[in-house]
Structures are given as structure tokens and as C-alpha cells.
Image (cartoon, rainbow, N blue to C red):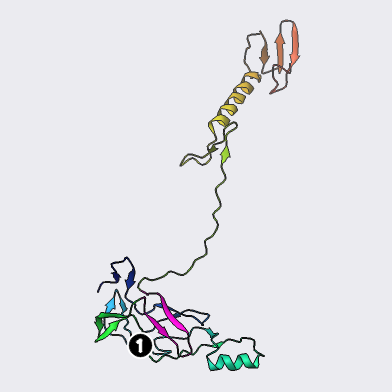
Amino acid sequence: MESKIIKRNGEEKSYVVEGATLKCRFGDQKSQLGLPEHHHIFIGDKPQASINDMQPHTNIRPFGMCSCQNNPAVAKATAENRGVLKKMPCDPVLTLPWIKGKNDVLLNNVPALLNISLNMCLYGGEIRIIDDGQEARLPDVPILPSFPQKSRTNKGNSKPFINPPGNPSSKPPAMQKEETVKQQEKEESELAIGKRYDLGVYYDPITGQQTYSALTVTVQKGATLQEI
């Protein structure tokens, strides 16, 4: 059976199945339509309802706490509370079938229940169908905050540097270039054992002395030309 009915004026109607969500004007909670004895007609895997599925506590379950003062229990509790409204547990009383069913679609000779159908509690609460029950609703799940991964930023560039895939320890190109230049300057300035320089300076690895013309200077390992 089709699940939706589209009227000519564009109004959407749908058939109602077990688990549909109901709401009473005077109840403080929603309820669900029960079909313990269904009609062996299904939409998807859910049994379809008819306008006769209106038995209190069987098809139409309580709506939490009732605030209707036509309810004798609420009226008595309110009077005992010096006129201040006091809600009492809902005990729905229904005696008539739902109205506004689908008269040309019958379930065991009874019109099918629609999402626009209405019923009335004997105490005055109008009962509506706010969800036809056809689609499963997932429970609300709290969304955990996401924390962005920290990334390095190149100097002079507002765009963050992101490590290339497979090389999480790589550095930004500008940082790599800067470190390369510093390393070259360090290698050029340090005195290497046994190395002869263009200035005519020679460092003897045996005596630990450096000779320049007639000047002899003792050089510590790792010293630079600037320090000499």
C-alpha cells in the first residue's frame, strides 16, 4: 500500500501505523499509538491503523499529567489546593472512533486512519496525530566538539603549513632553507683539523698549533676564524 496521499491542493496526507506520535491538548507529554491487535495490513514492516483503534490505554495511552479542569481528578485536586491548578495523572476516556479517516480505503471494512485524523477525550482534550510513525526516528545524540589540529605557520605567510602525507616530521620550506644557510655558515667558519686555508694558515693536528707567517697561535678544537 502507498504510504503518502497527495491532495489536489497540495496538502499532504499519510496513513498512520503503529508507534505514531500522539498529542493531547491538556497532557504534558506525548504518547504513542499502540496496536497489540492489528489488521494484518502493513506499511513497510509496521501494522496500519484504522479509525477504530482508539481504545484507552490499549491504542491511546496516557499523556503524562492532565491539566483539564473538566477532569474530576484535576478539579478535586485544584479545589483542595485553594483554587490553584494542580495537575493529575492522565486517564484518557474515549468513546468514539477517530474522525477524518480515509473512507475509500478500508481495513477489515473500517476506514484507514490518517495523519489529519482527530479524536476527543471525554474531558475535553483534543487528540492529534503529530507523526504518522512510518519513518524510524533516531534518538538525539549529543555532538562532541571537534578540536582542530595545530599546524605550524610560515613566517610572513598567513597560510598554515601542513605536513605532507607520510612525512609528519617535515618542516616548512622557509625553515628548511634558513637551517641550511646556518649550517653552511657554521661549516665555513669552523677550523677543520688538517685543513689549509687560503690565508696561508695551517693547523697542525699533532701539535695543536696554527701557523701564520711568523705568528704561531694555539687553537682550540672547534674554534672559528673570527675567534682567532
Q: Residue furthest top?
A: 213
Quarter holding residue 81 = bottom right
- Residue 45 magenta-highlighted: no
**From the image, which quarter does the C terminus lie in?**
top right
155 relative to 199, above or below: below
Residue range (magenta): 115-133
Name the element at disc 1. loop
**From the image, which quarter does the N terminus lie in?**
bottom left
Q: Residues within 10 Å of mark 1 (few under 14, many from 20)?
A: some
100 relative to 152, above or below: below
Which residue is painted at 35% across and 73% down in the image? 134
Which residue is painted at 58% across and 92% down in the image? 75
- Residue 119 magenta-highlighted: yes
Q: Which residue is disc 1 drawn over?
A: 97
Q: Nearer the viewer, residue 25 or 92?
A: 25
Q: Is residue 20 left or right of residue 144?
A: left
Quarter holding residue 17 = bottom left
Q: Nearer the viewer, residue 108 or 118?
A: 118
Relative image position of residue 20 (x, y in whole percent): 39, 77
Q: Residue furthest front?
A: 9
Q: How many marks?
A: 1
Q: Is residue 47 left or right of residue 146?
A: left
Relative image position of residue 157 (x, y in whole percent): 57, 33
Which residue is painted at 40% across and 84% down in the image? 119
Relative image position of residue 91 (x, y in whole percent): 49, 90
Q: Amino acid at mark 1?
A: Pro
Quarter holding residue 201 = top right
Q: Is residue 213 left or right of residue 87?
A: right
Relative image position of residue 208 (x, y in whole percent): 71, 18
